Image (cartoon, rainbow, N blue to C red):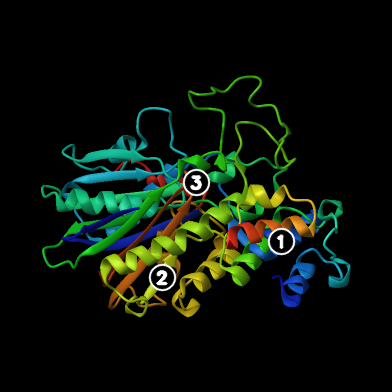
Amino acid sequence: MALVTTNHAAIRGVAASVPDNPISNLVLEKNHDDIGKTSSAVGIDNRYVTSSDICTSDLCLAAANRLLDELGWDRKSVDGLIFLSQTGDYILPATSCVLQYKLGLNSHCLAFDMALGCSGYVYGLLTTFSLIRARGLKRIILLAGDTISKVISPNDMPANVLFGDAGTATAIEFDEEAEDSYFSVGTDGSGYESLIIEAGGFRKPKSNHTNLRKEHNKDKVIRSEEELFMDGSAVFSFALSRVPESIKNLLSFSEYKITDVDHWLFHQANKFMLSHLAKKSGIDEKKMPSNINEFGNTSPPSIPLLMTTHGKEIGLDNSSQRIALVGFGVGLSWGSTIINTENIVLPDLIYLGKGDLSHESIH
Amino acid sequence: MVSKEFISEFAQIVEQDPKDLHNEFDLTSLEEWDSLAAISVIVLVDNYFNIVLDSDMLTSIKTMNDLYGLIEKRVA
């Protein structure tokens, strides 16, 4: 497991947007009697699901526009833009390039995409902080989002109950005074088939065969190869064996005690898993805010979304705090970090409707 | 090595009477023995023995004895 320290970078603000389309699992349960058990175990009552008109990039764009306005950052002052997602606009070019243009950022701006899921936000911060530490870049916007609902079979009830859509923006700035940040990250690619969309890439391009829905040999759910497959118990067993170890290594590496951390912001995987991970890692659940019941599992944006929905409640906007962020999932990949924060600007959550898209045109 | 309490919690997961869960009990005959049950059993075993069972191995077992065998192998 890689252990990394960085310094001189600080989070200035976090904004998030969800599609203005809440879907209640309680209503779904009425039509499918078999899912009540699943939705109560995962602790998800509601999720926000996008329409075909709204892409991940639109959600991230709305969040970034709001964040830049509330921070009062001149768009010309942004040196870097990273788009972290598994659901970009095109095979090529990189969505970050399209968004550099749509956000009206200067052409001196560095822009690239990162393709990771639930561990991604920790990797995104590690990359951003490292770029700033390397000197030269002062202000970077890290976008994290996904619209996984678009790649789930309508017959896949566990996955339909679990996943929601969201897009977020995090503003990170060079700060000579910023305290050190600590990261612990790892990868176990032997589990790459546990969470996978097999077709649509270059290994298995889309065809008249890959879009046919048929019974999957493992979980017997009717889906096509262009839709998400998840081996829930394999991912669960992976998380239980890797995450507590990652946290333990992070704490000993940083020389912080578990009680030195003010709040623990976990990737919102599902409620059952989160409470077991807390127990196994010895973390007080009262220090672990959660929004899983309202938003479901949103993949890479789940941690910044949680900062938007619960940050004010735990005082991230008006105090100095030491927070730990923990992500894990598809890859299989995991990461945790301890970061010191101060007065983070937290705009209200955006509920993005189709009608709002015209307002998000080019600045 | 497996306590009464463990069996009683296991019985709750698969919605059976603990008295019925003898060593040769065929788990694969149960409708309740699904992936959600597997996840609950992974957590149960972790709570009692501090080991995380491999999910593929867990879903390939047939009887209670097989489950005890899996745990024993990992504890040893």
Neighbourhood count class around disc 1 (C-alpha, 10 Å): few under 14, some 14–19, many 20 upward: few
Q: Position of residue A253 (x, y in %)?
A: 28, 65
Q: Is residue A28 visible?
A: no
Q: Position of residue A231 (x, y in %)?
A: 62, 46
Element under label 3? loop
Q: Are marks 2 and 1 in contact (CB under 8 Å)?
A: no
- Nearer to us in this view, A250 or B60: B60
Q: Is residue A254 visible?
A: yes
Disc assigned to residue A200 = none
Chain under disc 3:
A
Residue of label 1: B68
Residue of label 3: A330
Residue of label 2: A264
Q: Position of residue B47 (x, y in %)?
A: 60, 71
The structure residue drawn at horizontal position 74% and vertical position 50%, both measured from the top left corner, is: B61
Instruction: Please tell me which of labels 3 and 2 falls first in the chain.
Output: 2
- Nearer to us in this view, A316 or A58: A316
* Side of A136 where A55 appears, left or right: right
Chain under disc 2:
A
Q: Amino acid at mark 3?
A: Val
Residues at discs 2 and 1 both on one chain: no
- Nearer to us in this view, A333 or A312: A333
Spatial separation of the CA atoms under disc 2 and disc 1: 35 Å
Q: Amino acid at mark 1?
A: Tyr
